[in-house]
Image (cartoon, rainbow, N blue to C red):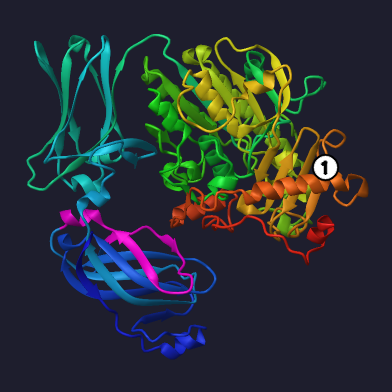
Amino acid sequence: APQSSARFIPPEDARIQEAREAGVKPKRVRAAYLTGEGAKALRIPCGLEAGSFNRVAVNVRNYGGSAELLSVVLRKEGKVVARSAWTAFKARGGLRPFRADFPELRFLKGDIDEVGLESRGESNAIAVTYFDLLDAPVEEFLPALEGMGAMVGLGEEDRCCVALSSRSALETERVLPDHAELFCSYGTQPALIGPGLNAILQISVEAEGVETLEAHFAINAQRTRSWGEAKMDLTAFADKLTRIRFELLTRSKLELFCLVGEAAVSRRALNAPTVLLVTSDTHRADHMGQADPDAESPLVQTPNLDALGNRGIYFTQAYASTNVTNPSHVALMTGTSPRDTRILNNSTRLVSQAPTLAEAFQAGGYRTMAVLSAYHLLDTESGLGQGFDRVNGPRRNDRDGKLSVDILEEWVEQAGGQPLFVWLHLFDAHSPYGAPAPHDETYWDGPRPFDKQAQPPLPDPLIPYFLKGLTDVDYPYQQYRGEVDYVDVQMGRVLALDRMDSAVIAFTSDHGESFGEHGVWWDHADLYPQTVHVPLILSWPGSPEGVRSTEFVRQIDIGRTLLDLAKLELETFPGRNLSWALDEFPAADALFELSAHGNVACVQTSSWRLCIHLRNHHEAALAEERQKHQVEFFDLQRDPLCNQNLAREAAHFARAKRMRGQLIEWLRAADPTGWGETQALTLEALQSLEAMGYGGDETGAMPAGSLYEEDPANEWCARFAR
C-alpha cells in the first residue's frame, strides 16, 4: 500500500460568506472554498524531496450540476515540473479523493516547492480539505512483472506487455519445434527509463550442443515514442530443450524498466489460418449492393463486398443488440447482450474479468491484432484491448479507413506464418458525412448546400454542429452513400491480401443510421430497422457460395461462429453458431435489443417487432420526446420499415400484450451487476466524444438493479394490465 509522505491542509478560506452566496453550504470541516466564475486554482507550499512521493490525492468536492475538469500541478522554483491530465471529476453528495500519479518524480532531483489543484471553471465552487502526498510501490505503475501482462500505448499503438527490471531477468525454457522463430516487441516510457538514461535489452538463447545466440536492442528516449520489434531465427535449436532469457543491462544505479510484449516462439508455416472480423461503423443493412438484388439502381456501389457475399453467405436479416458503438462492440466481442454487460454508453469500460473473443482465439494459439479507426474503442476507453497482442488506433477523434488498412496490410505481411485473428474497424460511414473525393460527388453533383444566413430546413436543435447552415436535408444522406462506397474501396484492398483467399471472414456493422425516419435526424437514436438492422457476410474455405439467408439472426452470435469455423469448438464462448440459419427447417429465436442509456428495449420475431420506452427521453436528434412505458408495435411482413405503429389497435392487442410480457420478462432476467466500470474521462476523451457526435450523457456505468418496473398509474401499463 502507498506510504504517506505528508498531508497538507489548506488554510480555511476567509470567503465563507461568498461560498454561501454561491449556493454552497459549508460543512463543519476545515476546508478551502474556491468560488466564482471561470478557472480556479489552489496552491500550497510543500518543500518535499521529489523522490519522496509519486502520488497526490486531493480530498475535494465540486458544487453544481456539471463535472469539473481538474489537474494537479507540481512546481519547483515557480516553474511547473509536472502536471496531471485534465480529468472530469464529479463528487456526488460529498467529498472524495481526486488522484494523480507522478511516477517520473523518482528521476527528478531537488525539492518540490508547491503542490496545487487547478480547475477549468465548470463548477460554481470547489471545496478542498487536504492534499495527501503518497509514495506508492513502483509496481503500481508497471503493466506487470510476469504473467499475461497488460496493454500499454506507445504512439498510436497499444501492445500487451510485461515490465522487465534491470535488477531481475525474465526467462523461459521449452523444447522448440523445427523452423522456429522468436518474435517480441520492446519499448519503454519516460517514467520507466528516466531522462538521459540508457539501457540495453539483451535476449539470449542457449541449449546444450548449440552455440549461444544473443541479440541486443537499445532502450532509450526514442523507444518511448514507438515500439521496436525483434526477430530471431531459432532453426538451430530444433528439438532441443532451450532457455530463452531477457535481461535489461544498464550502468545506472537506479532501477530501470523496459517493456517486452508479444513474446512468442512460433513455427514458420505456409497456409497458417487467418480469421478476419470487420466492423463498418454506422453501416445500414440496406446500404449494400446485394441488399436488393432486383433493384435497377442500387443505393450504393459495393462490388468488393458483393464479391465477398457471392463467395459465402449473405444474411439479409441480421440485427445488432444495441444502437451505439462501444456497447455494440462489447456485446459482439463477449457474445453477451448489453442487458447483461450493462455497458450502454461510449465511456464505460469493460472489466478485465469479462471473457472476450480475442482471449478465446489467443487461448487457441492465434496471434491477435486489432486496427481501429475511432478513439473511443481503444483499450483505455473501452476495455476491448484484452486478449489482443496489439491494438492500433487514433489518439484523438477518428481517422480515415485508408490509414487503418495501411497498418493492417503491414501487420499481416509481418506476421509470416503465424495463425492470425484480426479485428478491423472502419469509421468512414459515420457522421459528419464527408465522403472523400471523388466519392463526395458520386450522388451529389452540385455545390455544397450551406448558407448560415438562410432559413434552416429544420428546427435548429435538430441540426448538429457539423451541419449548421445546411439548406438541403438530402445532402448528408447522399454523402453517406458516398462514404459507404469508400468503405467498399478499402475492403477491396483488404480482400486482395494473399492470406484472405483462405481466410475465415465476417463483415458486419455495430449499428445503422437514420436520416429523418421516425423523426430521428442524422443519428442512430432509438431502436428502429434503420439503426439496428446491419449487414452480415460470412465466408470461409469450403463455405457455401452465393447463399442468401433470410432468417432473422443475432449479430452477437458471430463470435461463437468464428471460433467454430476456426476449429476452436472447445474454446468456451457464449452464443449460437449461425449455421442453424442454413438448416432445412431453421428454429429461430426471438431477438432482443436494448438501446443506448437503457432508453428503449425491443423484442422481434420474423413477423413482429415491439418496443418499450424505458425512460422519458428526448435526445438532440429526436424531433419528438419519447414517453416512459410508451409501446410501439409493428407488422414486419406488411411494414418492414416500421412506419405504422399498431400498439393502440384492438385487432393486435393480444399479440402485443404477449410480446410485451415476453420483453419485460427478458429485462427482469438481467444480470444485476454487469461488466462495466466507471472511469474518469480526460479532457481529450471528452473532446473526442463530442467531436464524433457523442456529447451529453456519456459518463457513468448503467446503475445496478432492475431494468424495468411497472407503473400502475401509467396509461400504457394500465392498458396492458387489462
Q: Residue at x 78, y 50 (%)?
A: 519
User: Element type at marker 1?
Assistant: strand
Residue 471 shown left or right of residue 416 in the figure: right
Going by the picture, which residue comes out furthest to the front?
Answer: 722
Q: Which residue is mark 1?
A: 634
Residue 104 shown left or right of residue 130 in the figure: left
Q: Quadrant of residue 383?
A: top left
Q: Position of residue 409 (x, y in %)?
A: 45, 22
Residue 59 shown left or right of residue 562 in the figure: left
Q: Position of residue 647 (x, y in %)?
A: 85, 49
Q: Is residue 462 above or below residue 546?
A: below
Q: Which residues are magenta?
A: 81-108
Residue 150 shown left or right of residue 2 in the figure: right
Q: Position of residue 365 (x, y in %)?
A: 38, 22
Q: Quadrant of the C terminus?
A: bottom right
Going by the picture, which residue comes out furthest to the right?
Answer: 651
Q: Residue at x 26, y 51 (%)?
A: 140
96 drawn magenta: yes
Total labels drawn: 1
Q: Quadrant of residue 314?
A: top right
Q: Residue at x 79, y 45 (%)?
A: 658
Would residue 447 be seen by someone viewing this image from the given angle? Answer: no
Would residue 492 be seen by someone viewing this image from the given angle? Answer: yes
Indicate the amino acid at tag 1: Phe
208 drawn magenta: no
In this rendered view, identify the residue nearer to me: 543 or 192. 543
Q: Position of residue 44 (x, y in %)?
A: 27, 75
